[in-house]
Amino acid sequence: MRKPHIVAAAILAAAPLIAPAGAQSAPKLTLFKTVTLPGYHGDFDHFAADRERGRILLSAEDHGTLEVFSLSNGDHLQTVKGPIDTPHSILVRPGVSTIFLTDSGNSMSKILNASTYAEVKSVPLTVGADSSGYDAKTNTLYVVTGGKDVDMKTASLEAVNPDTGALKGSVTFQDNHVEAMALEKNGPRIFINLAQTNKIAVVDRRTMKVVALWPVPPAQQNAMVKLDEAQHRLYVVCRAPGMVVAMNSDTGAVVATQPAPLRADDLFYDQAAHLLYVPGGEGYLGIYDTSSSDHLKLIGKVTTAPGAKTGLLLTGKHELVLAASPGDTSNVAKVLFYHISM
């Protein structure tokens, strides 16, 4: 593989929209570094930060690699190949010498050495392992499996011990397209997007039973979700059309909507600042004020790059990292590093 070209810059991203009356001002995003990855194709998926080792990890889903960057300066450090087929989500835990990588390919999900990325163990979940969510209190990783991408009419949520790969339990949905989830920290519920049937499934993770199904009527293809437990709000991003839907996390009632960029595949929430960030593949990032639980506001639009639809919010560093996937175009893959100033 050709060595990535690294371009450092101090380029001001497109000015945010003027904030509406009564809303907080949008933060300013300044692009300070671009790392290009020539020869890549298809889509990237999710990031993870490994603070103990000073690294940022990125799943190159369609390229079949794990990409490693420096957490301190963004330099591209390493491309991990080996037993990886179609990587998706990455679990890094403080004080743990392994990482868990969901992989929907033939080599299955796997536990890797967190320093060398050598395979420690293959984890034979149901095929199609993709999105995940982690419960630190019980040391349980919840992984979406199955679905239309692996020619299955149903999808499942499987509870896994990330140290051993042992299956703890599962629940099956009558839906062939299940996307991201949000876990309560102070309760037992998981909120998970059933994108085919346009619902949020509420799962009790103690029993692995579905306790409620909430429709998402304003838009279809609900894919991403974040939970604000203090305000009892779910923020659900839909793709058809692009929309952020705010829902009451106790009842499922829709309380507000705002337009969102198209082809979004990630969602970041700075709960302390009451700011929601939605990256879209069409080439801009939407910024939303969530300080009023019933009055979600779009307060900024920042031009990014075509295909920049997944990323990582580093609140402690006041930085946002985006992966611009080449997709089906001839664009060069790149990773964009932004500084956030309020």
Image: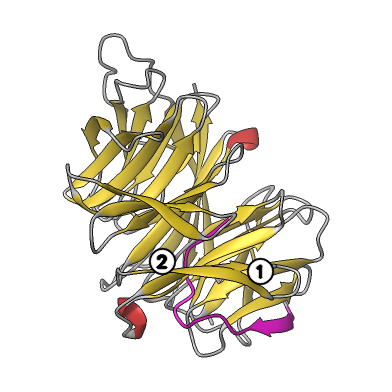
Q: Residues within 10 Å of mark 1 (few under 14, many from 20)?
A: many
In the rendered picture of this protein, how many numbered marks are placed on residues? 2
Q: Amino acid at mark 1?
A: Phe
Question: Residue 108 occupies which quadrant of the picture?
Answer: bottom right
Q: Amino acid at mark 2?
A: Ala
Residue 124 sits inside the magenta stretch: yes
Residue 116 sits inside the magenta stretch: no
* Numbered label attached to residue 100: 1
Residue designated by label 2: 333
At 65% from the left and 34% from the top, the residue drawn is 316
Q: Is residue 67 depicted above or below 337 in this figure?
A: below
Question: Residue 263 occupies which quadrant of the picture?
Answer: bottom left
For the residue pair 166 and 219, the one nearer the viewer reads as: 166
For the N terminus, give its image quadrant: bottom right
135 displayed left or right of 8: right
For the residue pair 149 and 71, the one nearer the viewer reads as: 149
118 displayed left or right of 131: right
Q: Is residue 316 visible?
A: yes
Query: Circle 2 — which element?
Result: strand
Q: Is residue 37 depicted above or below 127 in this figure?
A: above
Q: Is residue 10 visible?
A: no
Q: Position of residue 20 (x, y in %)?
A: 25, 15
Find the distance from the CA under tag 1 to the CA under tag 2: 25 Å
At 56% from the left and 62% from the top, the residue drawn is 142
At 45% from the left and 64% from the top, the residue drawn is 45
Q: Is residue 201 depicted above or below 171 in this figure?
A: above
Which residues fall within the magenta stretch? Answer: 118-133
Q: Position of residue 77 (x, y in %)?
A: 67, 66
